[in-house]
Image (cartoon, rainbow, N blue to C red):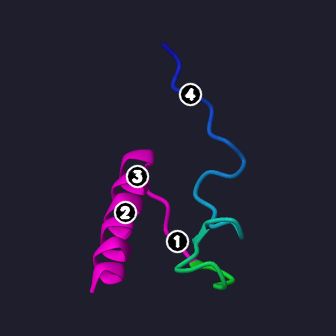
Amino acid sequence: MKPPKKSKFSGQRLPYDHRHRNSSDKGVPYAFESAYRLLEDFFAEVDRVIKEAQQ
């Protein structure tokens, strides 16, 4: 079985690899590793924002 072809974008940091900390934030770089890590980071941030809003 052949290994999957690498995309011309693999290993490159692209301008859309970023996250927004709030609605007015222009975005900060995000080092994408995997879909699993992205979701893990997203829900950790959601939990942080909810906890902060409850204080």
Disc 1 from disc 3: Cα separation: 13 Å
Q: Residue at x 37, y 46 (%)?
A: 36
Check disc 3: other Cα within 10 Å, few if <14, some if 14-19, many if 20+. Answer: few
Task: For the residues labelled 4 and 1, say whether their Cβ atoms are less than 8 Å apart.
Answer: no
Q: Which residues are magenta?
A: 29-55
Number of the label disc, if any, that sits on residue 39: 3
Task: For the residues labelled 2 and 1, say whether their Cβ atoms are less than 8 Å apart.
Answer: yes
Q: Which residue is mark 2?
A: 41
Disc 4 from disc 3: Cα separation: 24 Å
**What is the three-letter code of the residue carrying label 1?**
Tyr
**What is the three-letter code of the residue carrying label 2?**
Asp
Quarter where residue 18 is shown: bottom right
Q: Earlier in the sequence, mark 4 or mark 2?
A: 4
**What is the three-letter code of the residue carrying label 3?**
Leu
Task: For the residues labelled 2 and 3, say whether their Cβ atoms are less than 8 Å apart.
Answer: yes
Secondary structure, mark 3, is helix
**What is the three-letter code of the residue carrying label 4?**
Pro
Q: Residue at x 58, y 58 (%)?
A: 11
Quarter where residue 19 is shown: bottom right
Of the two numbered discs 2 and 1 in the rendering, the one whose residue sits closer to the viewer: 2
Of the two numbered discs 4 and 2 in the rendering, the one whose residue sits closer to the viewer: 2
Q: Earlier in the sequence, mark 1 or mark 3?
A: 1
Q: Which residue is mark 1?
A: 30
Q: Earlier in the sequence, mark 4 or mark 1?
A: 4
Secondary structure, mark 2, is helix
Q: Which residue is mark 4?
A: 4
Secondary structure, mark 4, is loop
Q: Judge whether residue 11 is colored magenta.
A: no
Q: Earlier in the sequence, mark 2 or mark 1?
A: 1
Residue 9: image location, x then y, percent: 69, 52
Of the two numbered discs 1 and 3 in the rendering, the one whose residue sits closer to the viewer: 3
Q: Nearer the viewer, residue 46 or 33?
A: 46
